[in-house]
Amino acid sequence: MDVNSLAVQEPGLVAWFLSHGADPNAGCQLDLTPLSYAVQYAPFDVIRTLFDHGGSIHTGQLVHCAVRRDQPDTLQVLAYLLNKGASINAVMYQNRPDSYQLQQAFGLGTPLHKAAQRGKLEVPRFLLENGADLNVVDSLGQTVIQRATIFRNPEVADFMRHNASISSH
């Protein structure tokens, strides 16, 4: 767990910060915000609270952070973000050239790339059902199928191959 995530996990502390003017969209050099950390680590109520206090889907790489979430409500959080208009096919930092340049050597891709890498089949399935594009390549030129294979997630790679063959017909 990231030490930066600790504050967003406590609803009372979040409420205190917000009541004292904290900005849920305040970013760092890599375009990570308090809302980014909440989407990855915090209870769903905290995420809603941050949106109620001006949280924006346009900063913080939120769908990418939600894919990294290790909670039973990951799909609920993803659906919430997509319903707010977050992009399912955005390449990480695509609108932040400075951040992209700093991180591109690590293979920046779409949320589907990260989901394929992590190997939890329900997340790539959800993303594909909601319009994720299998054909986007990451900053290293890898497809989501290659990412799943490299990170030894054969079940996810097979699922992606099956979906790729369906979409090509």
Image (cartoon, rainbow, N blue to C red):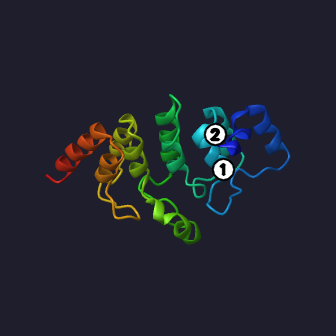
SS of the residue under disc 2: helix
Along the line of sight, which residue is nearer the eye, 55 or 35?
35
How far across and how far down the image is residue 83, in percent? 49, 45
Residue 50 seen anywhere in this rendered image of the structure: yes
Q: Which residue ends up furthest to the left in the rendered image?
A: 169
State the residue position of label 2. 47
Name the residue at 64% across, 36% down: 42
Comes first in the chain, label 2 or label 1: 2
Name the residue at 61% across, 38% down: 41
Does residue 99 lie above or below 169 as drawn? below
Q: CA distance from mark 2 to mark 1?
A: 9 Å
What amino acid type should be assigned to the residue bearing mark 2? Ile
- Judged left or right of residue 125, residue 55 is right
Q: Which residue ends up furthest to the top in the rendered image?
A: 72
In which quadrant is the N terminus drawn? top right
Mark 2 and mark 1 in contact? Answer it, CB < 8 Å. yes
Does residue 87 lie above or below 43 as drawn? below
SS of the residue under disc 1: loop
How far across and how far down the image is residue 128, in percent? 33, 45
Q: Which mark is residue 96?
A: none
What amino acid type should be assigned to the residue bearing mark 1? Gly
Along the line of sight, which residue is nearer the eye, 104 or 150?
150
Does residue 159 lie above or below 24 as drawn? above
Disc count in the image? 2
Query: Dot 2: few (<14), some (14–19), or many (≥20) neighbours within 10 Å?
Result: many
Q: Which mark is residue 55?
A: 1
Query: Dot 1: few (<14), some (14–19), or many (≥20) neighbours within 10 Å?
Result: many
- Judged left or right of residue 33, residue 118 is left
